[in-house]
């Protein structure tokens, strides 16, 4: 009996808590990103004080609910039904179909009338076509040069042309079929491995014998 206990003791010591690997993985992802953000803030190019002040002045001209809180902005005004909360807020605080909300640190323009929607989506669509600037995407996506995060302009049009011409044709999409199938199989195997890890040895032996 003592021999069996000594045989299994190294295996028990080798096992680590399941949450330990998760914590290590999160740290490996988050820590380099934080370092990059600090370096970017310290040495990188950011919006100048003048342009930031001009932007704040433009935003201040838009109607907005008065109960804005630090950090969370107007998030406390959004209930369990966001579309209903936005409708009520726009009816109460909006003007000409426009209202500004700060969802956390992100200023968000709420459009609630057909005329304002037409102005945003058709007349001035080139102004609203770009994604909001983010230092994180600027670092991770090589200066925001990818098609998903690049600002609207000549560069974005050229990248879109290259993607649609050389990557998204029917022939190219069909040629990637085996790669997609391989990724699906790999994901299913990974999910099964997680299920087996959560089981004890007796459950795993029952599954093996049942097969």
Image: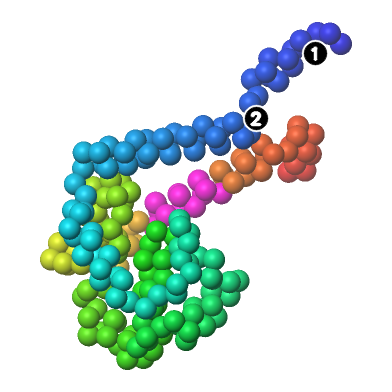
Where 152 sits versus 187, above or below?
below
Residue closest to the eye, 80 or 26: 80
Q: Position of residue 195 (x, y in %)?
A: 66, 43
| Quadrant for the C terminus in the image | top right
Residue closest to the eye, 151 or 99: 99
Q: Quadrant of residue 5?
A: top right
Q: Residue furthest front?
A: 66
Residue closest to the eye, 86 or 205: 86
Residue at (40, 59) in percent of width and height: 105
Q: Position of residue 55 (x, y in %)?
A: 24, 65
Residues packed near mark 1 inside 10 Å, few (<14), some (14 to 19) or many (20 plus): few
Q: Of the numbered discs in the image, which one, if any, rests on residue 183?
A: none
Q: Of the numbered discs in the image, which one, if any, rests on residue 5?
A: 1
Q: Position of residue 121 (x, y in %)?
A: 29, 82
Q: Could you give the CA–CA distance between mark 1 and mark 2, rounded to whole angstroms?
A: 20 Å
Residue at (76, 10) in percent of width and height: 6
Q: Residue furthest right?
A: 1
Q: Which residues are magenta?
A: 177-188
Q: Position of residue 159 (x, y in %)?
A: 19, 61
**SS at badge 1:** helix
Is residue 50 located in the magenta-colored stretch of the structure?
no
Is residue 178 located in the magenta-colored stretch of the structure?
yes
The answer, for residue 167, to whether it is visible in the render is no
Magenta part, dominant SS: helix
Q: Residue furthest left?
A: 154
Q: Of the numbered discs in the image, which one, if any, rests on residue 17?
A: 2
Q: Quadrant of residue 180?
A: bottom left
């Amino acid at each position: 009996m003592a021999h069996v206990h000594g045989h299994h003791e190294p295996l028990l010591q080798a096992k680590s808590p399941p949450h330990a690997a998760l914590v290590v993985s999160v740290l490996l992802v988050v820590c380099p990103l934080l370092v990059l953000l600090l370096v970017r803030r310290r040495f990188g190019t950011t919006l100048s004080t003048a342009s930031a002040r001009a932007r704040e002045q433009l935003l201040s001209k838009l109607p907005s609910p008065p109960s804005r809180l630090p950090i969370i902005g107007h998030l406390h005004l959004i209930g369990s039904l966001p579309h209903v909360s936005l409708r009520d807020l726009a009816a109460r605080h909006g003007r000409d179909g426009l209202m500004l909300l700060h969802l956390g640190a992100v200023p968000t323009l709420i459009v609630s009338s057909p005329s304002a929607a037409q102005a945003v989506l058709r007349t001035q669509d080139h102004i609203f076509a770009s994604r909001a600037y983010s230092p994180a995407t600027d670092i991770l996506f090589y200066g925001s040069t990818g098609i998903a995060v690049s600002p609207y302009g000549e560069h974005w049009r050229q990248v879109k042309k290259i993607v649609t011409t050389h990557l998204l044709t029917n022939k190219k999409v069909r040629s990637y079929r085996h790669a997609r199938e391989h990724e699906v199989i790999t994901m299913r195997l990974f999910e099964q491995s997680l299920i087996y890890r959560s089981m004890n040895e007796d459950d795993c032996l029952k599954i093996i014998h049942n097969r």
